[in-house]
Amino acid sequence: MSTDTLDLHGDHATPLPDDSLDQIFRDARTHSHWKDEPVSEALLRAVYDLTRMGPTSANCCPARFVFVTLKDGKDKLKPHLMDSNVDKTMSAPATVIVAHDMAFADKIPQLFPHAPEAKDWFTDPKTKHDTAFRNGTLQGAYFIIAARALGLDCGPMSGFDNEGVDKAFFAGTEIKSNFLINVGHGNPDKLFPRSPRLSFEDACQIV
């Protein structure tokens, strides 16, 4: 359904036009094959600058992003990939390690200045873990949306040895890897038909 037929915005927000929604959601695909076109540091910074504006619990912002673009970084990542993910990752202009910092609460006085005591909400190990993982995953999703909005294609995936990546990239820290996103300009000729999605009736309730 076209959003221009719906009164979605009331007196405040205006929906994006359909071509923008197509680019971010309807026509966007998960890519595994890439054009030989680099992704600049400026563009990666622009994607992060959008990503960081997404909401997190108490503005805790636990996600940490490592942009693997250079040969040395790719060589360090390669041994920890499943065989089926090696070619798509090695050929991607950039691979983003989406991780979360288990010491995120240390930055809450900076990020949540009106209630710096919120740092103490996350002393329980399970609460700390769940908050870091949940919100770091959210921020990874924001990254995908931001990248698509700025004209990039994404190939998010698991299928790697998290422990190995943590030792290779995050030794001596409390940062833990979550998932990877290959980023660049995908080759549409290599896509297969889109898989089905659940309907509103299958996935949703209004109560």
Image (spheres, rainbow, N blue to C red):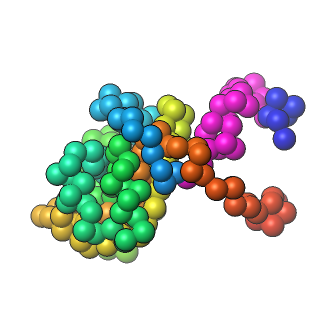
Question: Residue 66: percent from the left, percent from the top?
Answer: 28, 49
| The C terminus - image quarter | bottom right
Instruction: Tell me what residue is drawn at x 24 percent, y 54 percent.
Output: 74
Instruction: Tell me what residue is drawn at x 18 percent, y 68 percent.
Output: 167
Question: Residue 156: percent from the left, percent from the top?
Answer: 47, 56
Q: Nearer the viewer, residue 79 or 33?
A: 33
Q: Nearer the viewer, residue 196 or 101?
A: 196
Q: Is residue 200 magenta?
A: no
Task: Give the residue furthest to the front.
Answer: 189
Q: Is residue 147 left or right of residue 87?
A: right
Instruction: Tell me what residue is drawn at x 52 percent, y 51 percent.
Output: 31
Question: Residue 45: percent from the left, percent from the top?
Answer: 34, 33
Question: Residue 148: percent from the left, percent from the top?
Answer: 53, 38
Q: Nearer the viewer, residue 13 or 139?
A: 139
Q: Is residue 13 magenta?
A: yes
Task: Give the residue furthest to the right.
Answer: 5
- Residue 171's place in the image compared with 47, above or below, is below
- Residue 100's place in the image compared with 184, above or below, is below
| Residue 199 found in image quarter | bottom right
- Residue 150's place in the image compared with 114, above or below, is above
| The N terminus - image quarter | top right
Instruction: Tell me what residue is drawn at x 73 percent, y 31 percent.
Output: 18
Q: Is residue 124 in view?
A: no
Q: Is residue 23 in view?
A: yes
- Dominant SS of magenta comes to loop
Q: Which residues are magenta?
A: 8-30
